[in-house]
Amino acid sequence: MDGRKGESLAGQVPGPVWRVKGDPLVRGSGSGPLAGTRVAVKDLYAVAGQRIGAGNPDWLAEAPVQERNAWAVQALLDAGADITGITQTDELAFSLNGTNKHYGTPPNPAAPGRITGGSSNGSASAVALGVVDLGLGTDTAGSVRVPASHCRLFGLRPTHGVVSTEGLQPLASSFDTVGWFARDAGLLRRAGDVLLPPAEVEPVRTFLIAEDVLELAEPATRATFEEAARTLAERRAGKVRRVESLLGGRVETWFAAFRAVQAAQAWAEHGAWIEAHPGSLGEGVMARFALGRDLDPRDRETSEALLDEARGVLYAALEPGTVLLLPAATAPAPLVGLERAAMEEYRFRTLRLTSLSSIAGLPAVVMPMAPVDALPVGLCAVGPRGTDRTLLDLAASFADGGAASPEA
């Protein structure tokens, strides 16, 4: 039997934004809260009649045609949204740069000549270009939050586990989440009404700012962040509580532990395929998988214990009614084609920020703030577990310049 039976061939022209595009590719129910919304779906989600390409042509060539939609895709379709197409991703989603050796770098219209960030790069680009309204991505270590920051978008990483990952190709399941982008906070919240479980919107009384977290960002980004944080606190009539240290000098230790555990899980998921396809992955992506391959089991056990310690600290800091504010990325997007060592340095600096939410499985929303040297940067708010709707409400009030609606 032809392995491509049932797979749409329309729009099968790989490019830096789309792997498959239709008009639309999949039509939704036609009615519901997202009726008429155009959606771009990251190439990690099952879409019935299509293959999961995972950012790699060798993977795509062997992938089976999906018989049913991923849970998140189906939920959006049932709510009336149309799937415009399937967007490119970094290889196996193991990058934060948004560059792919096979398919190229999608454009960033908010910062021409600069990366979108990854690995939800294609979906972020499609939203920023205005060819879709909503982008469905994933966030393991910042792959929604960083592109949102670089592309002047709103983005949400939900509490780990609250949105079903059924039909989603995993990378590191302890950290993987569904996530989404929009150009406006209202649509971001309407998508949350569809994808998130019911929950009360809780009042935010305290905005926590930690000096040692801010030190991870570049000076210009910190200055812009300070103004945005002050504006948000004023609009929500909340108090700002500043602390010298949240991380207690352990950021490097926790970051190393996160990298080790993430890489070990990623190798367990994909190692057999990688060994069967030598040379298929780009050099940087392969190096990350190799870290997991070579990790001593005793070191992994130590790393797991360190992550438990980090979770305890972060849970204690985010008591009810408290939200941690931080820059979504350490700086604006780097230039496309930046030398690899410099790009890796940028990536590691930003991961020190983004990994905090990932380690603890905490929800995080990104809101565009004033530009830095005319380039987009994002304000990130991290809340206690289960406060996803509260964060969406916060983003809406920040965007509107006032208090959010009481029924939000």
Image: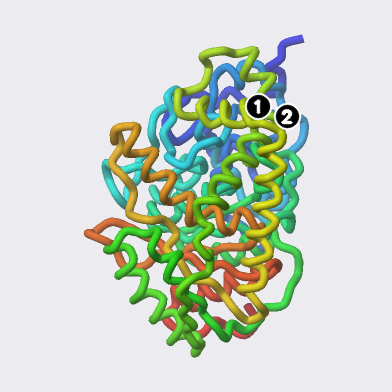
**Residue identifier under label 1:** 51
311 vs 150, left or right, is right
Q: Dividing the image into 4 quarters, which one contains the N terminus?
A: top right
**Residue identifier under label 2:** 66
What amino acid type should be assigned to the residue bearing mark 1?
Arg
Secondary structure under tag 2 reads loop
Q: Which mark is residue 340?
A: none
- Locate residue 343: give its quadrant: top left
Q: How many marks?
A: 2
Residue at the (51%, 21%) spot, across then down: 281
> Which is nearer the eye, 233 or 392?
233
Between the residue at mark 2 and the residue at mark 1, the CA separation in whole angstroms equals 6 Å
Mark 2 and 1 residues: CB-CB less than 8 Å, in contact? yes
Secondary structure under tag 1 reads loop
Coloring applied to the structure: rainbow
- Locate residue 7: give its quadrant: top right
The spot of residue 117 in percent (x, y) is 42, 44
- Mark 1 is surrounded, within 10 Å at the Cα level, by few (under 14), some (14 to 19) or many (20 or more) other residues, namely many
Q: Dividing the image into 4 quarters, which one contains the C terminus?
A: bottom right
The spot of residue 204 in percent (x, y) is 59, 82
Question: Is residue 133 at least partly visible in the picture?
Answer: no
Q: Residue furthest top?
A: 1
Q: Earlier in the sequence, mark 2 or mark 1?
A: 1
Task: Relative to 36, say whether 197 is above or below.
Answer: below
Q: Residue furthest left?
A: 373
Residue at the (75%, 50%) spot, across then down: 164
> Which is nearer the eye, 333 or 184?
333
- Locate residue 10: give its quadrant: top right
294 vs 344, left or right, is right
Residue at the (37%, 59%) spot, across then down: 217
What amino acid type should be assigned to the residue bearing mark 2?
Gln
The spot of residue 283 in percent (x, y) is 45, 23
